[in-house]
Amino acid sequence: MKVALKSLGPLVIGMICGGVCPGTGAGQSATPGGPTTRSANEPKSFVQGKVVQEPGGQGIRKVRVILRGGSNQGRDQFEATTDETGGFKIEGLEPGTYFVQLARSGYAADRKADRQKTTIRVVAGQDTKDLVFHMLVAGAITGRIVDADGDPLQNVDVMAMVEAGGAPRGYQTQPGRGATNDLGEYRIADLPPGKYIVQAAPPRNEAPPHRQNEKNTTNGRLVYVTTYFPGTLDQRQAAAVDVSAGGTAIASFGVRSSRAYLVSGTVMGLTAQPKPRDNTNEGSVAVTSQGAVLMSQGIGIGQLLLIGKNGQHEEQNLGEGGKFEFPNVLPGTYRAQVIVFSGFFSGETPPIKIQTISTPIEVNGSDVVGLRLQVDRSGDVSGKFHLDGDEKIDWKELNVLLLTVPESEEEEAGLEIVEQAGMARVNEDGSFEIKDVPGANYQLAVGAGSQKFRDYYMKSVKLGGQEVADTGFAVSPGTVLDVLVSAKGAGIEGAVVDREGKPVPEAAVVTVPSTGKLGRPDAYQLAMSDESGHFAIRGMNPGRFLVLAFEEMRENYRLPEFAKKYEGKGQKVELEEGERKSVVLKLITEGGERP
């Protein structure tokens, strides 16, 4: 349902491959003992390893080791439980890529130690041995949620989210959840050590009690509002809660209330009519900004999103004929977007159509009823790829994506929800076409799944003879792009070291562009250092960059505030086309300072 640009990380790139290519990553190098060859008549394989506690290295028993993936579109699941030494063995695996999940009450996966072992690639006729996964003694957050009078609130959904969202997909800890009891108490367990933002979301159908001195009003209803610790409505003003290994942090606070109003009407001009939810149909697929996959029953389901400048957002499935009714919308200015799930997941692109609505919705002191929201006129985006040089390449191995350009700093900061507006595979002759693209401003991104394209980059994107690679372009009916690709991408390599000059493995290295390329998705790159502290980023577009190394990348490094915050803490590099430069990076710790 929600796809945010900040969550795409190295998976959506303006260059081709950019040094982070599928098929060369994590999990494949996580086999210290190496694969063991089997005979041709024994195609199924096994995975064997151990789960240990960090620090200490002692084995942990009763850990569920779960593998999801394989060749059956990710539907296969295999698991085993560790023995008293922490050992496990999972047999009967078909070839394919499997995601790894560790589950044990009182423990949490050590994502920092195992960030390069989140997936395992099983090759036909080969076994994977001597894997080692690490877990930490988990912590917890507990507290009490009350109303304005200090009385307990029951059935409040409380969520703990890792501070500074926007971590690249695959390196982000999933939020923990809990609910309050009749005393208003909650407990969220099995949290990895770290800093968390705590959010309390009371049931929207429960209203605060009426006060004697409260003014009577015929409009609006007083409702409880999602509140962040220590009692703010703005997530950016929330205080972080520090959870230590085996420790319990306390976060008690009051939930605030606000007037809310009815917003109802009809969405007009939908290109695909939504259908009522039908539990007899199989589900279509949507991807959230956290990378989770959600299933929606039925075909042709339409969902309306109201995105507020105040950081609030509402969402619901459209009714028959595009009708909608939001009973409790807080005051503010909202922009509407429609997502229609028009088919089934086929293993490539989720069948999602995004339609925008330019007319803002103002909610201010009264109900807003009878709205007739007209979706914006869409257009087709087509184009042709060309290669700078005489080399012949297989264009069919490439795909193109359209990413929306935020209209304001508020949207850039993460309030904008939907960012990916279309995707298409490039044809053999280099042509491509993306149909029914909502009218908005976009950046073109190019992706490839082959290692052989890692030195290529997108050199030019022209619309009507005008260069739009850096600025982006507006979509109108019949938008035609001319894309030039070059094999002479620049590169940065080097080492990450600590304060003593020792190499740092598994550090997150990012590149941030200077002014002029701030909107280009290919200017922001991420790579991980290997066991010797070495890293390499290839296929970069020429320009000036700030290169930084972190213990763990949890911030959204695409934001302008990120570059300002860390200016002077990394290395500044200027690259010409085809140029390679080496740097030594000092590690930046969680506190933001180089040790």
Image (tube, helix red, strand yellow):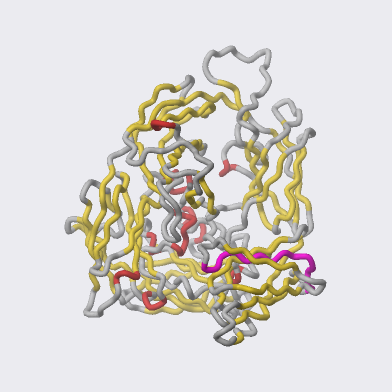
| 102 versus 232 height, above or below | below
Give residue 214's position: percent from left, percent from top. 63, 15
| Image quadrant assignment for residue 244 | bottom right
Q: Judge by depth and name the residue closer to the eye, 235 or 561.
A: 235
Q: Judge by depth and name the residue closer to the eye, 301 or 506.
A: 301
Give residue 88's position: percent from left, percent from top. 73, 73
* Residue 371 visible in this rendered orientation of the protein: yes
Let me know if residue 62 is in the magenta part.
yes
**Residue 128 appears left or right of 141:** left
Magenta region, residue range: 58-71
Q: Judge by depth and name the residue closer to the eye, 543 or 310.
A: 310
| Image quadrant assignment for residue 52 | bottom right
| 270 versus 520 height, above or below | above
- Residue appearing at x 43%, y 63% in the figure: 524
**Residue 475 appears left or right of 362:** left
**Residue 395 appears left or right of 352:** left
**The C terminus lies in quadrant:** bottom right
| 159 versus 450 height, above or below | above
Give residue 320's position: percent from left, percent from top. 42, 31
Q: Judge by depth and name the residue closer to the eye, 182 or 78.
A: 78
**Residue 289 appears left or right of 474:** right
Give residue 276's position: percent from left, percent from top. 46, 36
Q: Name the residue at the right extreme.
A: 84
- Residue appearing at x 76%, y 35% in the figure: 184
- Residue appearing at x 62%, y 66% in the figure: 67
